[in-house]
Image: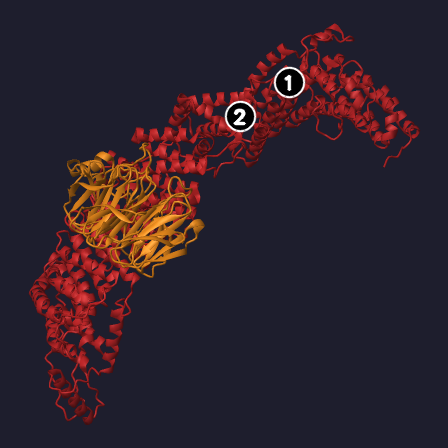
Amino acid sequence: MLKVPAPPASMAASPLPPPDPQFVLRGTQSAVHALHFFGGAQEQGCPLLLSGSLSGLVHIWSLQTRRAVATLDGHGGQCVTWLQTLPQGHQLLSQGRDLKLHLWDLAEGRNTVVDSVVLESMGFCRSSVLAGTQERWMLAMPGRGSDEVQILEMPSKTSVCTLKPEADAKPGMPMCLELWQADSNPRPLLLAGYEDGSVALWDVSERKVCSRVACHTEPVMGFDFDSQKTRGVSGSAEKALAVWSLDEQQALQVCRTHELTNPGIADVKIRPDCKILATAGWDHRVRVFHWRTMKPLAVLRFHSATVHCVAFAADGLLAAGSGDQRISIWSLYPTHSDMSAPLLGHAEGREVGAHAVA
Amino acid sequence: MAVFDTPEEAFGALRPVCVQLTKTQTVETVERLRAQLQAVSDSALQELQQYVLFPLRFALKTPGPKREHLIQSVVECLTFVLSSTCVRERELLQELFSELSACLYSPSARQPAAVSEELKLAVIQGLSTLMHSAYGDTILAFYEPSILPRLGFAVSLLLDLAEQEKSKQIKVAALKCLQVLLFQCDCQDHPRSLDELEQKQLGDLFASFLPGISMALTRVITGDFKQGHSIVVSSLKIFYETVSFIMADKHLERTSDTQPKPASVEPRVAELMVHREAKWVKNTSDKLTVLIKKITECVSIHPHWKVRLALTELIEALLLKCSQSLVGSVGHLLKALVGLVNDESPEVQTQCSKVLRHFADRKVVVGNRAFADILSENLHSLATSLPRLMNSQDDQGKFSTLSLLLGYLKLLGPEVNFVLRSAAHLQRLSKALIQVLELDVADIKVVEERRRPSGGLSSSPESAALLQRRYFRFFTDERLFLLLQQLCQLLGFYGDLYLLVDHFMELYHESVVYRKQAAMILNELVVGAAGLEVENLHENHIKTSPEELKEIVTTILEEYTSQENWYLVTCIESEEGGEELTMKQSGLQAITSAAHTCQVTSFPAFSKPGPTICSMNSNIWQICIQLEGIGRFAYALGKDFRLLLMSALYPVLEKAGDQTLLISQAATGAMLDICHACGYDSPQHLISQNSDYLVNGISLNLRHLSLHPHTPKVLEVMLWNSDASLLPLVADVVQDILATLDQFYDKRATSFVGVLHALLAALAQWFPDTGDLGQPQEQSAGEEGSHLSQKPAAPENTATAEDIEQFLLNYLKEKDVADGNVSDFDNEEEQSEPPKVDESDTGPDVEPPPPVQIQIAKDVMERCIHLLSDKNLTIRLKVLDVLDLCVVVLQSHKNQLLPLAHRAWPSLVRRLTSDDPLVVLRAFKVLRTLGGKCGDFLRSRFCKDILPQLAGSLVTQAPVSARAGPVYTHTLAFKLQLAVLQGLGPLCERLDLGEGDLNKVADACLIYLSAKQPVKLQEAARRVFLHLMKVDPDCIWFLLNELYCPEQLTPPHPSLHPVQLRGTAGQGNPYAANVLHLLQELQ
């Protein structure tokens, strides 16, 4: 007689509900193309999430109130493709399709452009920085020639060098860059993914390619590199992820590839604790893998358009930005040992595991 | 104005009288002496004091029986002398004292003599005056050990009088005199305070009387309430003054155990002397404890507030001065004091709080272990007996018990944790609270009352308060609830909040029986912890920090709004039931409300209030309490609650849309509380400012609709209460909703259609079109009306032949134009255009994408096309409403509207021609709206697809209804006829039908103008014609006259032939009445 609005019986049959975002940020009013977490546990104040949109705005979101606390408008309505904060000071770098790279001062509620670098090629390539505790830091960005990468010393903006592939290589445009420095070796290295699907390792000081390996048949859209294990993973327009490693002789080699159901990976990120990685799919989905085994763990369905970017926070929170103008925030396999922390949505380990769809 | 100023003169005047008095002792002589004394100045009298006193004392002392009157007047005269003079010698004082007291003593009976009341009063007055007349030193000398027997005699005499006498005056006087004797007189004549030693000596002296005084006074105090409050008040005063004087800690401290032998004391007197050593103190204290217990118990319930006020003074005095010596009574005293904290008299309350604050300030309670020990001991024992007391006592008893508990908490402050940390005591305390707070859930109204089906969130606070009133099983007194609230708040304020919240959360989980009470208690604990309604008596107490409080509130909130505690069964109807009928519908008020009442009376549980009703009632209350809790939490946290809105607002809004009136009211109340706490102007403001949080909740819950079936409701409430700025935020959610709807067409259509309706209504309101459809009916009516008046309906007699000629020429010309035989296109609007549907607008030039609202309306309308043929009548009705609104929103975007209208058409035709009368009517409304914006499109289709069928059915049904009896009006056929007739008129007018189609309609409706048809159908038919007249009055005029022609027509010009119309004017014409009525309208 009574109709109980409780979970229906069918719930028992289906194994577990699909994981949900912990929450969703709305209000960018255009597609989200760049995400970056800023601050967190070690910083005073609540952690922030920065998002760059197709309409050229950078939104600063408070993860505590889940609202935009500020909007930066500096790219003349052109898409913001890359966001990065510098370790010291509240400084933000933003790269836009208006061929500008702005340095913002965010300290104490300020949001002003303190410096700008003009880019010289209209590529898709996102820049990269190598910054330590020193005052000086290094910036890698696409150079004048379509296949060149330019290295600048900041904040003086002096050009260190231009990395141009050998004439016979023809790797095409650089698609993504990552500057890094091995613990043992103080010389800065640059990893670059190219249009022809290859990933190359540059020795910046010697301006030469140490190693280059073809990972994909399509342009490399994004990669991430785990400098501890000296292993990286890259995604491209094709239906596969490539995992490659770097041996002691600084030679790159492809370890394995992982087939996907749908083609097109816009972004790949490894979580700071190097346990899992997430990919942003053109098929509207975010896929989560175990980094060591590359075992697929979960397919996160929420967005209704291409996912353009993913980002991990220091505490493990995952954010995904999509063409549907939403940013979804997920809490998966919390890195904290205390499970009482209210980070956990539906997605406890086994639940997500049970839902893993390759 | 003394006559005799010098002693000599006075002596001369007084001497004869005194001599005479010595000789003959009569009342008259005494009176004469007294009269003479009046004329003597005080100083002179002082000189002659001994002389004057002698005859009077002599008169008293003469042995043998005396007349009472004489003694009385002698005593009065003596009193007079003493009042004007001072007694300077100790001997005189002592003698006078004994002589006066002897007047009331009958040696035979060993009790006060049976003398007249006047005499008693006179003697008491005399004694009192005597003591006042003594000089400071003299009086101190008077209180030497040797006076002990005589003093004791007088004291017992006065006590007897105070206790036994009938006359209130005597009692009061005796008590007053006793005060004087015991050095407690508060008049201005004794300014000198005693030094330490003197106090000690006096104390020793008075100690002998303590048993007598205390017992006698206790008897007086605990006597009949009717004896008058002033007696009890002064007895109380004497009691505490005496006890606190004799038992004062500061004197007893310094008493040695061995009694110093006073030298000059007779052995008989020495026996009477008391030495206040430790043993004596202990004995006395034990005995006093019994008395004090009696007094406090009796007096705390004394009806007169002044008595209770005096009790607080007693407690204060004893606690302040004798807390060591009377250690056994401290418990009783505190208990009484604490019990008076919530006295009904504000004076007592104030005094009590003052005393309590005084103790708290002096750290007596916290600092002095003894006090704190006693308090917690009392609290322990109270906690132990609390469940039993709550079970057995009546409201008044419960009230005083709980007041007592409250007082303990106030006094103990943070120390209360000693009790709370004992698991057994916490258990008992909480059980008692839970037990007493049990709600009475038998009231059926709670389950029955339904929310008024309007979208807004406004509800008058008074009616809400009335409804939200709770009935408790174990008490009815409203004050008790307030007291319990205070109690919980105080617990939350002083107690270990984590401990308490944990404990009550456990109870909350333990059983449904406890859940409501535990929630109520938790709510108040949190408010108390915030320290908002609590007066802090303990300055060193540290409040719960806002962060901790927020954490605790978050935990409780999570619990409250969890799946199993938030989604309880509160009604029997299923979602798909007739419930949705109660939602507001315009137009068919009568029918809807009829359906509503019918639905309520058919409520199955109405006839058998069983356990299910109770459990639903209980569930409703539970949700209300939890909602109230959310409001209380907001109140406790203030602006800090804003962060919690992320998780709290959604569930509240969910309940604001609940069908149970009580719940939706409680939710509205909670929202108001939140608004108040977080600084929002109104619930609307609250919703619009936090719509992002709500949208987040909605979109996530839509993903699991089976788990969160109420999600659409939240969106609905949100839409009703927001403005256009919400649209960008909800746009993606609307897409989600539509996508989910596509998945669940069969199961959850009802709730979705509700949302769609709210959405479209909101869109129509937010984006009003400039060419509004709001009042098109009136507009067009006005136009047509003027048109109608311009055109002469019938040729006037005054017309000339030229006029007629001109008229005919014009007519012919117009006819030509109408037939299309005209070359110039200056009157384009008259031309009928082909339907625009097939005209494809998708030219090569790319159109800008339509605005969001248009896109949404388009998407919704597409869904409506599918849902139009739903099996459920309610859904079909609702969908027609949504469709109507879609048309309104889309009206200015014909490119979007027309293709959709085209697709919706077949389904709409089905609704009009073969569906429930309600649906038919509603479908007509949609057609009317549609007709307003795409009339041309609709006209041809209407005439082709619908009109023939409708006209046909009207014609075939007409004979049936004409023959039918009164029962016919209840049949479906009748309702259909009525619906068609009601719908046709406005639609025809709106569509501006051509002549042929108009005639079709008119022909079909004419039959219904017959008087043989049911009245309602006649009315409806008349209305159809009224509308038709606006389209083509001439044609209708002719048609009506053909049916019934009331008057002979005279041609406008003699050159024209008279016209004979077919309508017969006979009385038997069944159309006469209606046609006449309509023709009148045409004039």
Image quarter where the N terminus of chain B lies is top right
Q: Tag 1: residue type?
A: Met
Q: Tag 2: residue type?
A: Ala
- Residue on which disc 1 sits: B247
Residue B665 percent location from the top left of the image: 34, 46
Residue B640 percent location from the top left of the image: 42, 43
Q: Upstream in the sequence, badge 2 or badge 1?
A: 1
Q: Nearer the viewer, residue B1078 or B850?
A: B850
Tell which subunit mark 1 falls on: B
In screen coordinates, is B172 left or right of B41? left
Q: Secondary structure at mark 1?
A: loop
**Marks 2 and 1: same chain?**
yes
Few, some or many residues within 10 Å of mark 2 (<14, 14–19, 20+)? many
Q: Nearer the viewer, residue B411 or A309?
A: A309
Examine the rendering and report whether any part of residue B198 can be seen: yes
In screen coordinates, is A44 left or right of A243? right
- Residue on which disc 2 sits: B336
Examine the rendering and report whether any part of residue B1019 can be seen: no
Q: Nearer the viewer, residue B28 or B843?
A: B843
Name the mark on residue B563. none
Q: Is B585 situated above or below B175?
A: below
Chain assigned orange: A
Q: Is A337 situated above or below B644?
A: above
Few, some or many residues within 10 Å of mark 1 (<14, 14–19, 20+)? many
Residue B473 percent location from the top left of the image: 36, 32
Q: Is B62 situated above or below A70?
A: above
